[in-house]
Image (cartoon, rainbow, N blue to C red):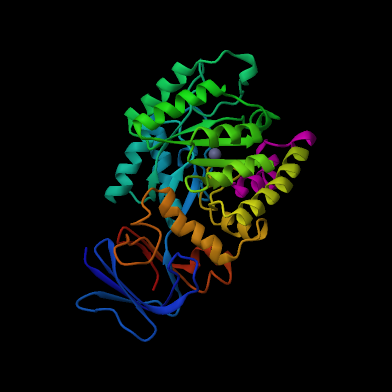
């Protein structure tokens, strides 16, 4: 690789500060120079790209990605039993679509194949398969059950605690090379009506999992809806909390107390998709389901506003990958942060870039435009700090660069 210089651009550096006119130079896979106003960066033999006044910004991160579920805006693949090879192909397909839509990083919300997830991460990193930087994750395994997304959720009331078995699964996942293990502390109402509000795991199991995760240096991610599950996840040191729909004041207080280590992904995209498109795919279709979802949409608006008020990190990422919420629509979450949670566009862009670098565990290297940061870049036709919806329009993404490689350039 060599050098590329972007001229005639407005730079949004990821901090949340307003854009400024300037230039930026990339050498190999790294940002090496920025200039403001009429200043110029070094040219040398660099390729020049005239940004035509557009916005150059860090690539986007999705905090709740399900590449292995397999549905994209190009191809709907219904969830089902798949082997590792089939899953690897789905992840490769979804990864390419995600990158096509400006998402250069993804924190995985879980996969049915640890082998495929880790192999995809290696191929994406090496650059011979197009896809985002991926922080990989396994799904949990409920004692006595299979690994992966289940469609019937055995609540903790109907089984004995088995902490050793749960801890052993965390060790197995760490040995397989995943970065995180996702626990569905509550069920999934889309598959098992009402199960969002039932707890799956005993506290002793979660304590044992957390202890093992610390020893093996993997993160724990919680799919949690109820205040009780949020309390458990925060108390036991989970790093990423999804959904949090039924958070109450006490749960929010606990989150706020530990906000330096917590990342939240409320995933408004899936809530909207369940309401708008679920029934046409045969999920969330009953009258009771509809009421539950409408109520969830109301609650999550309040939770999102509370997170913002309390300064708790909340990142876009809306469970994309299901047939009714396909990968490629990921930018819809950014707009929902504005519409539902009251963020300014600049705040959302900060969350999707700089905070993305933090949740990818590379805060000093990823998610900002600054010297020494990795060259994961988007050049947007227009000003997304004024119109967040631009990021959902693929033809407005004039340049997509990941790791210094031009994945797309229409200038
Ligand atoms: Zn999910």
Q: Is residue 101 visible?
A: no
Q: What residue range appears in magenta? A: 266-289
Q: Within the image, what quadrant is residue 165 found in?
A: top left
Q: Within the image, what quadrant is residue 271 found in?
A: top right
Residue 355 percent across, percent down from the top left: 46, 55
* Residue name at image x 51 percent, y 57 percent: 351
Along the line of sight, which residue is nearer the eye, 189 or 172? 172
Residue 46 percent across, percent down from the top left: 23, 74
Residue 128 percent across, percent down from the top left: 28, 49
- The picture quadrant for ligand 1 comes to top right
Dividing the image into 4 quarters, which one contains the C terminus?
bottom left
Along the line of sight, which residue is nearer the eye, 152 or 100? 152
Image position of 30 with respect to 83: above or below: below
* Residue name at image x 61 percent, y 30 percent: 186
Q: Is residue 90 visible?
A: yes
Dividing the image into 4 quarters, which one contains the N terminus?
bottom left
Q: Is residue 31 left or right of residue 264?
A: left
Q: Residue furthest bottom?
A: 38
**Residue 288 among magenta residues:** yes
Residue 114 percent across, percent down from the top left: 39, 32
**SS assignment for the magenta stretch, majority:** helix
Q: Is residue 183 left or right of residue 1?
A: right
**Residue 151 among magenta residues:** no
Image position of 132 with respect to 152: above or below: below
């Amino acid at each position: 690789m060599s050098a590329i210089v972007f001229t005639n651009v407005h730079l949004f550096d990821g901090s949340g500060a307003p854009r400024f006119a300037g230039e930026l130079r990339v050498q190999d896979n790294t940002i090496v120079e920025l200039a403001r106003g009429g200043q110029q960066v070094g040219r040398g033999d660099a390729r020049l790209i005239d940004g035509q006044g557009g916005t150059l910004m860090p690539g986007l991160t999705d905090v709740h990605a399900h590449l292995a579920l397999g549905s994209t805006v190009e191809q709907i693949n219904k969830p089902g039993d798949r082997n590792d090879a089939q899953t690897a192909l789905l992840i490769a397909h979804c990864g390419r679509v995600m990158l096509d839509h400006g998402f250069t990083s993804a924190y995985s919300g879980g996969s049915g194949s640890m082998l495929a997830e880790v192999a995809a991460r290696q191929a994406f990193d090496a650059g011979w398969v197009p896809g985002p930087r991926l922080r990989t994750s396994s799904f949990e395994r409920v004692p006595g059950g299979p690994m992966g997304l289940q469609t019937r959720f055995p609540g903790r009331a109907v089984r004995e605690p088995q902490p050793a078995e749960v801890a052993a699964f965390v060790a197995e996942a760490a040995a397989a090379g995943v970065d995180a293990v996702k626990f569905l502390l509550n069920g999934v109402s889309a598959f098992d009506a009402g199960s969002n509000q039932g707890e799956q795991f005993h506290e002793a199991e979660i304590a044992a999992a957390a202890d093992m995760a610390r020893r093996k240096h993997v993160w724990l991610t919680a799919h949690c809806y109820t205040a009780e599950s949020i309390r458990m996840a925060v108390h036991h040191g989970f790093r990423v909390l999804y959904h949090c729909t039924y958070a109450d004041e006490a749960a929010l207080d606990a989150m706020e107390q530990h906000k330096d280590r917590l990342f939240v992904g409320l995933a408004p995209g899936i809530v909207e998709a369940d309401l708008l498109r679920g029934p046409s795919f045969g999920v969330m279709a009953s009258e009771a389901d509809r009421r539950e979802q409408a109520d969830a949409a109301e609650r999550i608006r309040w939770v999102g506003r509370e997170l913002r008020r309390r300064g708790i990190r909340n990142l876009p990422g809306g469970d994309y990958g299901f047939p009714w919420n396909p990968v490629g629509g990921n930018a819809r979450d950014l707009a929902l942060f504005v519409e539902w949670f009251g963020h300014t566009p600049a705040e959302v862009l900060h969350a999707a870039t700089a905070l993305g670098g933090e949740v990818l565990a590379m805060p000093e290297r990823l998610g900002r435009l600054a010297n020494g940061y990795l060259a994961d870049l988007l050049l947007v036709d227009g000003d997304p700090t004024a119109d967040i919806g631009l990021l959902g329009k693929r033809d407005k993404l004039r340049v997509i660069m990941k790791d210094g490689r031009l994945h797309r350039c229409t200038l």
